[in-house]
Amino acid sequence: MDWVESLLKRSCDKTLTKEEVLRSLFHMIEINENTLNHIQSDKRDFGPELEKLKQTEISDLDFHLKYYRSLVNYINSIPENKMIKR
């Protein structure tokens, strides 16, 4: 995940701290969880074509949630002494 470190370094060089990056990721997780819950709780029947689209959207949101959570875990694993100080 060298690209994550590179992105984090560029973010720190410009404006973002580690905490700000994490806060942004947590926000994205929250948005995706809310959207996923909304889609899953909608019990209307729109027919097979839209049901397939709904399942694709659920799968995509699930993937993004796993991705954002893995980024949070990775960023949290970076020791503070390896972080770029401003």
Image: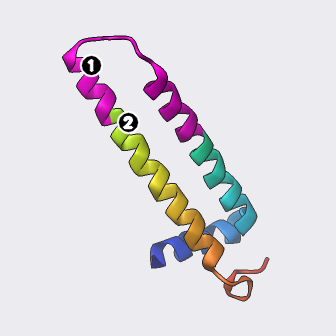
Quadrant position of the N terminus in the picture: bottom left
Kind of element beneath mark 1: helix
Marked residue nearer the N-terminal end (1 or 2): 1
Residue 84 location, quadrant: bottom right
Picture layout, residue 50 above or below residue 86: above
Quadrant position of the C terminus in the picture: bottom right
Residue labelled with disc 1: 50
Picture layout, residue 30 above or below residue 13: above
Residue labelled with disc 2: 58
61 left or right of 80 in image: left
> Residue 55 location, x and y as percent?
30, 32
Closest to the observer: 42 or 11?
42
Residue 54 location, quadrant: top left
Kind of element beneath mark 2: helix
Q: Which residues are magenta?
A: 31-56
Q: Amino acid at mark 1?
A: Leu
Label 2 Cα neighbours within 10 Å, binned few <14 / some 14-19 / many ≥20 = some
Q: Residue furthest bottom?
A: 81
- Residue in the image at 53% along x and 40% along y: 32
- Residue in the image at 23% along x and 12% along y: 47
